[in-house]
Image: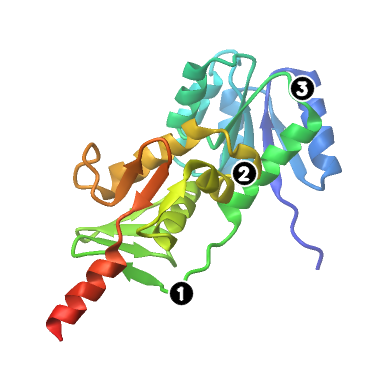
C-alpha cells in the first residue's frame, strides 16, 4: 500500500490565498481540504480529522482567534495561523490560545512549506526513550508511552510540543541547554531565533509540573543562556548510596 498522505485543512476567506496554499501543499504531496469561515472549519475539523490546520486570523463573523479557541476545546490538532499583522501582541495571543506556529502575510512558498513540514515533524515524530515510566521524585513522574506527566498521582496529558521540550530537558538533566539548541531540536533548525515560542512553552510546562510555577524547582532558568532541568539522577544516586 502507498504511504498515507497527511491531510491539511486550509481556512481562509480569500480565494486567491486558498488557491496559492493548496497548489503548494499538493505539489509536496499533501491532501488538502478547504473551509472559508470559522464555523465551516470547526465542522470539517470534526468530520475530516486533519493532521494540520492552516488558519487565517482575519475572517468575518468568527475570526481565527475565536475559531482556534473553540477548536482547542475538542482537539489538539496542530495549527499554523496566518495574519497580515506582524505585531508581537497578536503573535503571543495566538500562541497562548494553542497555535503551534504563526506566519505573517505575505510569505513565500518555500518558507510556508518549510514551516508546515516542521510543525508536522515535531507533532508526529515519536520520541524514543529507554524508560517507559521515569520517576523524577516523590511527586513527579513522566510516562513516555502515553506522553503525560503524573503529578501527585494525577495524570496530565502533554501536547506534542510540550512533550518534546520536556524530553530534551530531561535527557540533559543537570546541564544547561541553550535556547538555540532547544529551539532547533524541538521546533526545527529554522526556528532558532524564535525565543518567544520557547518561553511560552516553558511557562506551559511549569504550569503543569511545578508546585509553584513562579518559583520552579524542576525547570530552571539560566538567564541569557538557556534552561536546565534539575539533576534528579545525581540525587537518586546519592539516596541509593545512603541506603547502602
* Above/below status of 156 relative to 133: above
Q: Badge 3, how many Cα within 10 Å: few under 14, some, many 20+? A: some
| Residue at x-position 41% and y-position 72% | 132
Image position of 17 (left or right of 210): right
Counting from the top left corner in percent of width and height, residue 61 is at: 55, 14
Of residues 112 and 16, the one nearer the viewer is: 112
Which comes sooner in the sequence, label 2 or label 3? 3
* Above/below status of 181 relative to 170: above
| CA separation in Å, label 2 and label 3 | 20 Å
Circles 3 and 1: CB distance less than 8 Å? no
| CA separation in Å, label 3 and label 1 | 45 Å
Q: Secondary structure at mark 1?
A: loop
Of residues 58 and 114, the one nearer the viewer is: 114
Image position of 237 (left or right of 158): left
| Residue at x-position 49% and y-position 47% | 161
Q: Which residue does the numbered mark 3 point to in the structure image?
A: 17
| CA separation in Å, label 2 and label 1 | 25 Å
Q: Report if residue 8 is visible in the image.
A: no
Q: Which residue does the numbered mark 1 point to in the structure image?
A: 130
Of residues 212 and 78, the one nearer the viewer is: 212
Image position of 43 (left or right of 219): right
| Residue at x-position 68% and y-position 38% | 115
Circles 2 and 3: CB distance less than 8 Å? no
Q: Secondary structure at mark 2?
A: helix
Which comes sooner in the sequence, label 3 or label 1? 3
Q: Which mark identifies residue 239? A: none
Q: Which residue does the numbered mark 2 point to in the structure image?
A: 119
Which comes sooner in the sequence, label 2 or label 1? 2
Q: Give residue 145's quadrant in the image.
A: bottom left
Q: How many marks?
A: 3
Q: Nearer the viewer, mark 3 or mark 1?
A: 1
Q: Secondary structure at mark 3?
A: helix
Amino acid at each position: 500500500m502507498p504511504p498515507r498522505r497527511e491531510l491539511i485543512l486550509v481556512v481562509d476567506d480569500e480565494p486567491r490565498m486558498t488557491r496559492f496554499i493548496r497548489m503548494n501543499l499538493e505539489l509536496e504531496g499533501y491532501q488538502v481540504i478547504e473551509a472559508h469561515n470559522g464555523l465551516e472549519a470547526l465542522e470539517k475539523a470534526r468530520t475530516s480529522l486533519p493532521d494540520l490546520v492552516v488558519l487565517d486570523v482575519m475572517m468575518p463573523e468568527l475570526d481565527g482567534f475565536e475559531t482556534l479557541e473553540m477548536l482547542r476545546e475538542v482537539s489538539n490538532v496542530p495549527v499554523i495561523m496566518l495574519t497580515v499583522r506582524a505585531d508581537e501582541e497578536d503573535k503571543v495571543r495566538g500562541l497562548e490560545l494553542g497555535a503551534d506556529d504563526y506566519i505573517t502575510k505575505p510569505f513565500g512558498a518555500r518558507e510556508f512549506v518549510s514551516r508546515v513540514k516542521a510543525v508536522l515533524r515535531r507533532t508526529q515524530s515519536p520520541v524514543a526513550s529507554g524508560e517507559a515510566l521515569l520517576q523524577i521524585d516523590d511527586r513527579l513522574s513522566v510516562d513516555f508511552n502515553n506522553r503525560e506527566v503524573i503529578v501527585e498521582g494525577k495524570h496530565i496529558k502533554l501536547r506534542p510540543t510540550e512533550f518534546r521540550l520536556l524530553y530534551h530537558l530531561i535527557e540533559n538533566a543537570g546541564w544547561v541547554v541553550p535556547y538555540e539548541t532547544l529551539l532547533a531540536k524541538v521546533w526545527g533548525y529554522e526556528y532558532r531565533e524564535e525565543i518567544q515560542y520557547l518561553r511560552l512553552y516553558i511557562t506551559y510546562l511549569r504550569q503543569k509540573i511545578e508546585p509553584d510555577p513562579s518559583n520552579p524547582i524542576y525547570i530552571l532558568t539560566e538567564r541569557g543562556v538557556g534552561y536546565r532541568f534539575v539533576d534528579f539522577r545525581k540525587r537518586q544516586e546519592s539516596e541509593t548510596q545512603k541506603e547502602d
